[in-house]
Amino acid sequence: MVSSIDVRSEEFLERKRNYLKLRDEFGDILKKNTRGGYPEAVKKHHARGKFLARKRVDLLLDPNTFFPELSPRAAMGQYRDRFPSAGLVTGIGVIHGREAVVVANDATVKGGAYVAETIKKHLRAQEIAPENRLPCVYLVDSGGVFLPEETGVFPDRFDFGRIFYNQARFSAMGIPRISVAFKLAGMATKIGHARNTPDKTCRMKDQGMDYTGEAAMSKLYCFCIAGEVVDEAVQIHGGYGLMKDYAIERLYRDRRLPEIGEETSEILQLVISRKIGC
């Protein structure tokens, strides 16, 4: 192929300079939007022995494989830039040689809370799974909906509740769904549905905890995970239901995982997830 472009012309050089300038500006925006929340939040996150969301994704995926992150500029210029990447990391990664949709909460961004753009980003990632028959892996570290924006995220059919509707659809379609429940500074509320309704949930002993609102809901989650209602998995506190550490203990009981002692590091949790995952 012969090109008629004169790479030494002033016009070409000017356009090249403009392009490189725009490329650098775009790179700076991506760096800003993918570094997590405020430095203070990142420091607290590390002090608790927790990895950042993108580090978790990196540890989960096969080494030296490409992870095309989706919508890294979500919520840019909104909420006074307090929600970089909408507090969520999504993309398609390779686990044991098989591609999977990965959704990871960034707990350094308002505790991994959801605003409207977070929900839209989550739903767009979920759309990829049925279209391509890909498993879904959720790295859950979220306190649910961002309360100041709560009134604007539930009413419509394509809002927060759609996430759980999709979970049910994927189950009927036979699309695998794995949830990795990380330790929270507080207790998860509505996001508990997302971490407990997949096919398998990896939750480390004394690490993961869900506040589900009532005992009946806790029993329902146990049924989704174990296939039976197990009363001892539910603790009642003042009329509220609390489900804790059940999923991983069930895996031990059924001998689907080797004995691993009391190690509770996030690295081990992600290794276990790879064992029970794709």
Image (cartoon, helix red, strand yellow):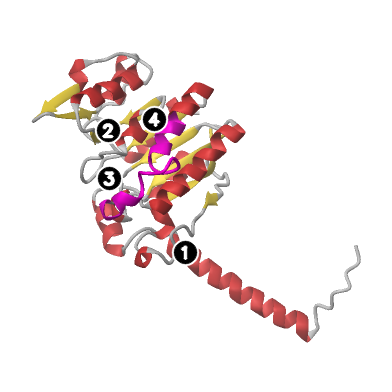
Amino acid tagged 2: Glu
258 vs 175, nearest the viewer: 175
Number of the front mark, 4 or 2: 4
Do callouts 4 and 2 mark residues in contact (Cβ within 8 Å)? Answer: no
Whether 188 is drawn above or below 202: the answer is below
Earlier sequence position, callout 1 versus callout 4:
1
The numbered dot on residue 143 is 3
Earlier sequence position, callout 2 versus callout 3:
3
Do callouts 2 and 1 mark residues in contact (Cβ within 8 Å)? Answer: no
Total marks in image: 4
Whether 208 is drawn above or below 55: the answer is above
Report helix, strand or loop for mark 2: loop
56 vs 21, nearest the viewer: 21
Q: Name the outermost residue toward the bottom.
A: 10
209 displayed left or right of 84: left
Picture residue at 22% right of the left edge, 23% below the top: 216
Location of the N terminus by quadrant is bottom right
Number of the front mark, 2 or 1: 1
Q: Which residue is mark 1?
A: 31
Earlier sequence position, callout 3 versus callout 4:
3
User: Which class describes the residues within 10 Å of circle 1: few (<14), some (14-19), or many (20+)?
Assistant: few
Amino acid tagged 4: Ile
Does 207 appear in magenta?
Answer: no
The numbered dot on residue 272 is 4
Picture residue at 34% right of the left edge, 63% below the top: 82
Q: Tell me where the magenta segment starts and ends, as one range.
A: 147-167
Q: Which residue is mark 2?
A: 263
Q: CA distance from mark 1 to mark 3?
A: 25 Å
* Image x and y of residue 5, in percent: 84, 74
* Image x and y of residue 205, in percent: 24, 30
Number of the front mark, 3 or 4: 3
